[in-house]
Amino acid sequence: MKFFIDTADTDEIRKAAAIGVLDGVTTNPSLVAKSGRPFKDVILEICELVDGPVSAEVTATETEEMLDEAREYASWANNVIIKLPLTPDGLNACNTLTDEGIGTNVTLCFSANQALLAARAGASFISPFVGRLDDIGHDGMDVVDEIVTAYDHYDNIDTEVLVASVRHPRHVTEAALMGADVATVPPSVIEQMFQHPKTDLGLEKFLADWESVPGSE
Ligand code: E4P
């Protein structure tokens, strides 16, 4: 499974890229607003840090305006892909961008049926939002399981399942067990994924024991 980072904070992206675990980046309007920086500056800097797909989201709600934004963003760097909402206009734009060879990430997906529609529109990625489903008492990972299972039945579906709205490390484990293609993970959850008390205790003991090895400093 590939790892994307879900942030517009370039310091965090730089850190994760240095560890070597980064296959791409997802942003959204809320994350860009949080960065306090102009959208284009942020996307350009991210594209220099990471070779993989960098999602830049349109904010227009009608197809033609979405396409105008999308074509502009796609011209900024080779690895920009266009994030589009799962609406009829969004899928209409997705269909056109796919024909033009521009990568897409269809976002705000909350059901397998929505994911089937996005696949027919040629989406490069579909982003089911697991955390936001959990928030309203559903099990977000059940939707991921349904999407992966449904897509697997059809050789002509190339859309990758990108698990989004990840809130904790268990979401990541389950995404991998279900065979999702990608998880986009916030920096805080990447940090949590490293954590295990036995790792800390084991390291502490190895370092303490090393002190008694003759000749060690
Ligand atoms: C990523 O593509 C999504 O925009 C993001 O994961 C949403 O996460 P949130 O539900 O924590 O805002």
Image: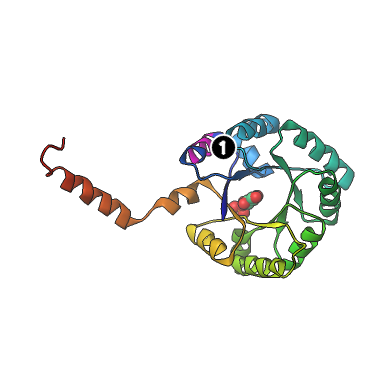
Q: How many marks?
A: 1
Residue for point 77% across, 62% down: 156
Instruction: Using the image, determine if residue 79 lies above or below residue 146.
Output: above
Q: Position of residue 128 (x, y in %)?
A: 67, 59
Q: Position of residue 148 (x, y in %)?
A: 66, 66
Amino acid beneath label 1: Asp
Q: Position of residue 39 (x, y in %)?
A: 69, 33
Q: Check disc 1: other Cα within 10 Å, few if <14, some if 14-19, many if 20+.
A: some
Identify the magenta region.
11-16
The foreground one among 118 and 206 is: 206
Colour basis: rainbow
Instruction: Using the image, determine if residue 33 lies above or below residue 159.
Output: above
Magenta-colored stretch includes residue 141: no
Magenta-colored stretch includes residue 14: yes
Helix, strand or loop for the magenta stretch, by majority: helix
Residue for point 50% across, 61% down: 173
| Mark 1: C-beta under 8 Å from nearest atom of ligand 1 | no
- In this view, which residue lies farthest toward the right? 64
- Quadrant of the snapshot with the N terminus: bottom right
Residue 42, located in which quarter of the rendered image? top right
Q: Which residue is mark 1?
A: 9
The foreground one among 112 and 103 is: 103
Label 1: state its secondary structure.
Answer: loop
Instruction: Using the image, determine if residue 167 lies above or below residue 4.
Output: below
Q: Position of residue 180 (x, y in %)?
A: 61, 61
Residue for point 16% across, 48% down: 209
User: In this image, 171 relative to 70: left or right?
Assistant: left
- Quadrant of the snapshot with the C terminus: top left
User: In this image, 73 relative to 203: left or right?
Assistant: right
